[in-house]
Amino acid sequence: MTYDPLMLTNIVERETVRGYKRKYFRFRRDRWYGGIVTGDVVGCNLRCKFCWAWRFTWNTRVRGKMLTPQEAFHIMKKKAGSRIKKMRLSGGEPTIGFNHLIRLIELSINAGYHFVIETNGILIGLNYSYAREISKFHGQGIEVRVSIKGTSPEEFTRLTGAPREYWFTQLRALENLIEAGLSVGDEVYPAVMLSFSTKKNVLYLKEKLREIDENLPEYIDPEYVILYPHVEYLLKVMKLKPKIAYRPDNVPEELI
Ligand code: SF4
């Protein structure tokens, strides 16, 4: 299975974006980030062979709802109640339907919430203007977690089926966001899927991150496969075996 993430972006966009509206498959409160409300969007421009959300996000015709930023914010605010002060988009790729994302961040931040964008970075790496738009929220409670798929271009292709050059595009997302003015560590940092990596490749990645900003390697947020039944199924179909993975009831505290 090979594909071009940009072509996939266009296809996904046609199915999941209408003007300022974006398709969602659910909203939830959960334990990550010390308590956060999450809007899970439908549609992604990668096909990671360990994807936890593949059942809802790969098939864009899955049941879901097209929502305006105001509608999505309203639902998230209700779910947050009085205790939760953080919001994020996850599930698929939130930068598809970029106008929706920016408006939603505006609404959240203006209402006093901290907003986390979990992204694979492909579109931010390809469009400096996206980084510039996001950087408008510098110092106001924005956090961009760029999830790098593997520790080398070859590993990226093995894990996602996408051409190797897009691994560098993911790194460029970090570069663009830093150049646009987000601060390293608290506002932008790399999350890295390490379940399939060798020590040598981890060193290679750190070297590449250091070329962008000397402090970036120390902010790597490690990601490991969590063996939900549907993830185990996908790994089996994709013939991929993690070196390190965790059962859902046994995720180490420091990864939550
Ligand atoms: S980037 Fe995230 S949502 Fe998209 S396929 Fe990979 S793991 Fe799934």
Image (tube, rainbow, N blue to C red):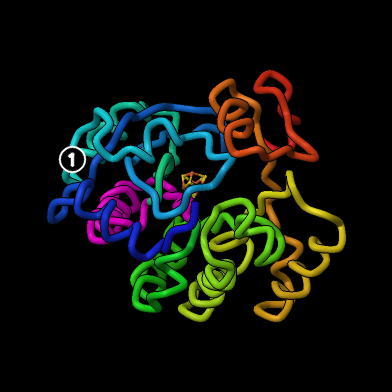
Near-viewer residue (29 or 212): 212
Mark 1, secondary structure of its residue: strand
Near-viewer residue (215 or 21): 21
> Amino acid type of disc 1?
Leu
Q: Which residue is mark 1?
A: 67
- Which residue sits at x=20%, y=33%? 65
Q: In x, y percent, where is residue 17?
A: 20, 51
Residue 185 quadrant: bottom right
Queried whether the magenta region covers residue 117, the answer comes back as yes
Q: In x, y percent, where is residue 164?
A: 59, 68
Relative to 2, residue 153 above or below: below
Queried whether the magenta region covers residue 112, the answer comes back as yes
- Which residue sits at x=78%, y=74%? 207
Q: In x, y percent, where is residue 148?
A: 60, 58
Image quarter (top left, top right, bottom left or bottom right) of the C terminus: top right
The reply, left or right, for residue 88 in relation to residue 208 is left
- Which residue sits at x=68%, y=58%? 155
Q: What residue span does the magenta drawing correspond to? A: 94-119
Q: In x, y percent, where is residue 114?
A: 44, 48
Label 1 beta carbon less than 8 Å to ligand 1: no
Residue 86 quadrant: top left
- Which residue sits at x=25%, y=31%? 75
